[in-house]
Image: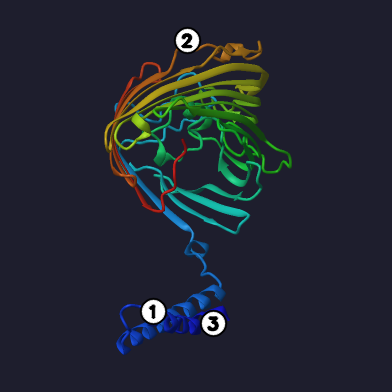
Amino acid sequence: MFRYTCFYMVPLLMALVLPFNSHAATDHDIQDIHDQLLQLDKRLQQAESNTNRPPPASASAFNPAISLILAASYNSLSQDPNAPITGFPFSPNNHGYHRSFGLNESELGISASIDPQFRGVATFSFSPDGSTSVENAFVQTDSLGYGINLKLGRFFSGLGYLNEQHAHAWDFIDQPLVYRTFWDNQLGEDGLQLKWLAPTDTFFELGAEIGRGRGYPGSDRQNNNGAGAEAIYAHWGDDFNLNNSWRAGLSLHQTKRVNAVADAFGVSNSFSGDNITSGLDFIWKYAPNGNTSVTSLKLQGEYFQRREYGLLSYNTAGVDTTDVYRVAQSGWYVQSIYQFKPHWRAGLRYDQLNPGNAEVGPLISGNIVSSYAFTPSRYTLMLDYSPSEFSRLRLQIAEDQSRRGKDDHQLFLQYIMSLGAHGAHQF
């Protein structure tokens, strides 16, 4: 009603005003005003129609964000990549690479908001051997409030710093030695994750997880109704000033192992017991005026200590002998990444392991190595070029001294290409 009142009132007002104007209006002027009013009326009708019409559905509501990560490399290794790391007989020997040309792990990711309450994410991993696995598949809450976030399904654990990062976001082609031996490169879980972000100016986050313990270092117990693994962790951080920021963390993980085969002790030997791992992590970032697009420096490190205790069964002459086995092992790394000009970065990493001294029962002590008297370590240099956030070319060389008497001189050439949606990486 207001629209039509305005439409007929304007000519009346113009008729009253124009006679007092020093320049008399002509018929042509009046016609122009009439035409302009007609145009205004059309726009008002269109605006009124759009106001009553429901808003169009967002494209993302029907089409989830899809990304494909393609990665491949040429690897030159002076030693057999299948040779085990010295001092960790119960750890998997997953070095994550091969000799010569080949694919690296590639990923297909799908994510979208399901409704105002939930968001869904799925990541499928394509291994170099041609196999496919579900890396992540979870739903996540969006509206619990109070800084609380709940995740259900399959996910990478939030402990430490590197564990939640997908392979294409790593600063080096491979994980540190401690991640390889303690977590089989990454700790994944099927279960529930709860995080709380404190409502403070300083970043502070608490997290807790419970799951079935499907992956190493746990033993997948699908026929057990109870939880097989638990984790808790805390992260906090802040900005020193415009140029510097930091984040630190504490974590604790506990699981059980059942009949874990020790490769170094023979085919019939196995360990059953508890596995408890605690960790510290820290990262510091520097960028002049907070601008990371030109130059920046990143320094990070993590330390983990693992304690295992239980029973070890050792087979000699066809007879199984069982006795206590207890060991404390640790590992750490420190690395620095320097972006010395736009698109170019250089990195240096040193990592080291401590196999520890095992306490072995007298019944099996004669057949078990309790002390290896060896410290596995590695030096790594990296140079990469990223024309954009969607592509990266990398050169990496390393001196791997993680196997006694088998120093491995390594050279890697790698590409990582991202197609489609590209989510933000963590701090």
Among numbered discs 2 and 3, the one appearing first in the sequence:
3
Give the position of the N terminus as an image quadrant.
bottom right
Question: Quadrant of the rendered structure where residue 292 is?
Answer: top left
Q: Which residue is mark 2?
A: 373
Q: Which residue is mark 3?
A: 5
Disc number for residue 20: 1
SS for callout 2: loop
SS for callout 1: helix
Give the farthest residue toward the bottom: 27
Crowding at label 3, few (<14), some or many (≥20) Cα neighbours within 10 Å? Answer: few
64 to 330, vertically: above or below: below
Q: Is residue 54 left or right of residue 194?
A: left
Front label number (3 vs 1)? 1
Query: Visible in this render: residue 412?
Result: no
Front label number (2 vs 1)? 1
318 to 130, vertically: above or below: above
* Amino acid type of the residue tagged 3 in the rendering: Thr
Q: Position of residue 361 (x, y in %)?
A: 66, 13
Give the farthest residue toward the right: 225
For the residue pair 204 and 135, the one nearer the viewer reads as 204
Question: Quadrant of the rendered structure where residue 203 is?
Answer: top right
Seen at 57% across and 53% down, the residue is: 119
Q: Position of residue 49 (x, y in %)?
A: 52, 78
Seen at 40% across and 41% down, the residue is: 168
Among numbered discs 3 and 1, the one appearing first in the sequence:
3
SS for callout 3: helix
Color theme of the render: rainbow
Seen at 46% across and 52% down, the residue is: 109
Q: Label 3, label 1: how many angstroms apart (C-alpha)?
A: 24 Å
Front label number (2 vs 3)? 3
